[in-house]
Amino acid sequence: MFSKASNAKKPPGTDTLIGQATKLEGQLDCDTDLRIEGTVKGDVTCSRDVTIGETGIVESNMRAANVIIAGTLNGDVDVTGTLIIEQTGRLTGNTSCSAFIIKEGGHFNGTSRMSVEAHDKQSAKHGKAAKQRAAEAAMES
């Protein structure tokens, strides 16, 4: 009656949504992509990507792989990858990231620091890919 597939655990990557009418207080630890459309007060740690939607309000420090801010974040942000502040986004706090994009109309009030560690990981990743492409091209010649 029940197949093994229906009993299987959901794979990592299943999104977590904090909806518009939701208010969350306390520490949030997440191993999936996270989208915040409601209000969060408390530290957020996510091993994957975080998106703060236009209606999202976050009053906390945040650690994540990549962060997109289209709403409001008041707190410090530590990102191993890319931080993007969209046209409607507001960040009040300090950030450490390997890439930082502020789209026209986006607001940032704080200090930013390019993370050497994250930048080195990204460079190594791109360097390996470039070396592999060069080796493949040499083999084709």
Image (cartoon, rainbow, N blue to C red):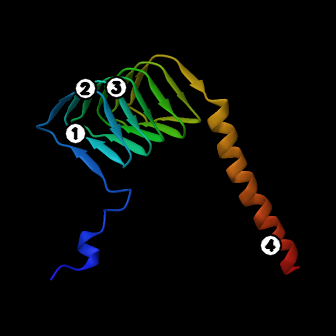
What residue is shown with label 2? Answer: 26
Say which label, 2 or 3, has the lower sequence index.
2
Query: Mark 3: which secondary structure?
Result: loop
Say which label, 1 or 2, has the lower sequence index.
2
Residue at screen point 25% across, 38% down: 54
Q: Nearer the viewer, mark 3 or mark 1?
A: 3
Identified by mark 2, the residue type is: Gly
Q: In the image, is residue 55 above or below residue 94?
A: below
Residue at screen point 39% across, 30% down: 106
What residue is shown with label 3? Answer: 43
Identified by mark 1, the residue type is: Glu
State the image quarter where residue 47 is shown.
top left
Q: Which mark is residue 136?
A: 4
Identified by mark 3, the residue type is: Asp
Count residues near mark 4 (Cα–Cα under 10 Å), then give few for <14, some for 14-19, many for 20+: few
Q: In the image, is residue 101 above or below residue 90?
A: below
Q: CA distance from mark 3 to mark 1?
A: 16 Å
What residue is shown with label 1? Answer: 37
